[in-house]
Amino acid sequence: MFKLLVGAVIGGAAVWFLDPDRGEGRRGQALSYAKKGKDQAAQAGESLSETAQTAAQTVQDQASSDDTPEERTPASERLNDPALQAKVESEIFRPAGAPKDKVSVNVEDGVVYLRGQLDDPAAVETLREAASKVEGVRGVESLLHGPSEPAPAKDESHG
């Protein structure tokens, strides 16, 4: 039954368009509608493209205006502890030769805890200073120690 119906529709369309007397006009009209639809789709696409470009420029302008320090939300309010930890690790381990494999970084309530054993006392101070300069860090507790020193205990006054 379905095949019969489809065949009838196709046959009717063929007769409509292939009619020797009026078929040429109907085919021209159908092509005219198709061209008009194509032109309308192209105009809609251009309009959509312009809208997207305008929106992208607006977002870019807002993002660049957010970079001004007086308008930025402090990192301590933007970053949770895991995000701040990642930021601190990125900053303090950036220099070549940084002791990534010997130092662990933990953050609790915005306070950075550096743990590990280092041979160079100057490296201990360098890491502590670098961590304290990262935006959003409220404090740094260095639990770093030398090879002959016992590991310091965490000061419980911060949590």
Image (cartoon, rainbow, N blue to C red):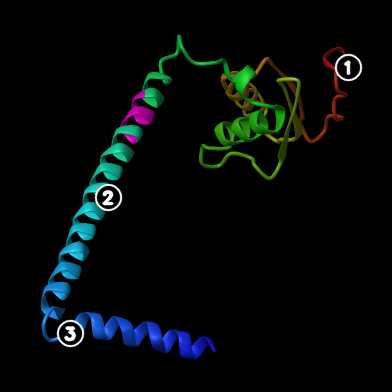
- The percent position of residue 119, horizontal first and vertical second, equals 70, 36
Instruction: State the residue in front, 43 or 121.
Output: 43
* Residue 156 badge: 1
Q: The magenta stretch spans which residues?
A: 56-61
Q: Marks 2/1: CA distance?
A: 62 Å
Placement of the C terminus among the 4 image quadrants: top right
Q: Mark 1–mark 3 contact, CB under 8 Å?
A: no
* Dot 2 or dot 1, earlier in sequence: 2
- The percent position of residue 84, horizontal first and vertical second, equals 65, 28
Q: Marks 3/2: CA distance?
A: 36 Å
Q: Which residue appears at 58% of the width and 20% of the height?
A: 75
Would you name the residue on which mark 3 appears?
A: 19
* Dot 3 or dot 2, earlier in sequence: 3
**19 horizontally vs 45: left or right:** left
When asked about the image quadrant of residue 90, the answer is: top right
Crowding at label 3, few (<14), some or many (≥20) Cα neighbours within 10 Å? some
* Residue 45 badge: 2
**48 horizontally vs 7: left or right:** left
Q: Which residue appears at 11% of the width and 82% of the height?
A: 21
Q: Marks 1/3: CA distance?
A: 94 Å
